[in-house]
Amino acid sequence: MPKNYYPPLEAGKTYHIYNRGINSTAIFKSDANYRHFLKLYDEHCSCVVDTYAYCLLGNHFHLLVKVKDILPTYGDLYPQFSQGEVNKKVSQSVEPSRQFSHFFNAYTQGFNHFCSPKRTGTLFERPFKRIEVNSDAYFSNLVVYIHQNPRKHGFEYDFRIYPYSSYNSHLSEKKTRLDREEVLEWFGNREEYRSFHEGEVDDKIEDFIIEE
């Protein structure tokens, strides 16, 4: 099995998904890039995952997601498959890993097109990295780790005011596509959520993540 092999995402499982630009190149250069990334993520991936947390930083990103227990079929997402000749994919469940690949490809095409001068080729490292989250402690520490990343990488010392993470979305009362209530219930309430973020994450979490 290749060293960089990652098994496909499985229904009902929770994952830390993260990746960076190829050769550590920037994948976000403007506010518009960040917003477009989230828009495409919603379009391509919200059908197959529930999102708990995220953070986007310059040349990499982090996502904490749970693959839906029941996945849509290709016929659900792409009605054109059911038109004309019978297509075997109509009744097949959508593959979460493939949806993420479609998402990355769509973002890359837009990013390359608007770069000046225009760039070509792959933007993200392949395959995208994923780790199954299979313990309560890992989940709790991972939420905080993801939100504290702006401080870790020198983007913003006060991670609480960094605009491209889900930290404040969890505290807000505004409508969100995040699975906010489950995250807040996990920590107990908003105050416990804030308090947990003031601490340091378990050093062991670093053993699972390779960003540099």
Image (cartoon, rainbow, N blue to C red):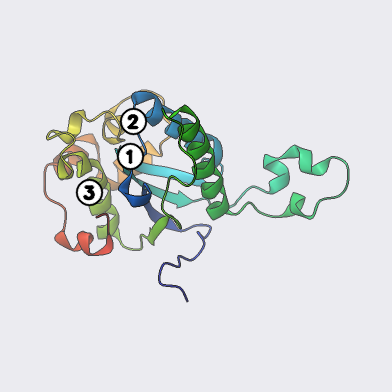
Mark 2 residue element: loop
Mark 1 residue element: loop
Question: The residue under label 2 is which amino acid type?
Answer: Lys
The reply to whether the C-beta atoms of the residues labelled 3 and 1 are less than 8 Å apart is: no
User: Residue placed at 31% from the left, 42% from the top?
Assistant: 59
Mark 3: give few (<14), some (14-19) or many (20+) Cα within 10 Å.
many
In primary-sequence order, the first of circles 3 and 1 is 1
Residue pointed to by mark 3: 145
Mark 3 residue element: helix
Q: Would residue 127 be found to the left or right of residue 147 on screen?
A: right
Where in the figure is residue 134, as x and y percent of width and height?
Answer: 35, 63
Q: Is residue 210 above or below residue 195?
A: below
Question: The residue under label 3 is which amino acid type?
Answer: Tyr
Residue pointed to by mark 2: 29
Q: Is residue 69 visible?
A: no
Give the numbered dot on residue 26.
Answer: 1
Most extreme residue toward the front is 117
- Please name whichever residue, 34 or 67, is drawn nearer the observer in this view of the structure: 34
Q: Quadrant of the C terminus?
A: bottom left
Mark 1: give few (<14), some (14-19) or many (20+) Cα within 10 Å.
some
Q: Is residue 143 above or below residue 14?
A: above
Q: Is residue 171 visible?
A: yes
Foreground mark, 2 or 3? 2
Q: CA distance from mark 2 to mark 3?
A: 23 Å
In primary-sequence order, the first of circles 2 and 3 is 2
User: Residue placed at 27% from the left, 28% from the top?
Assistant: 163
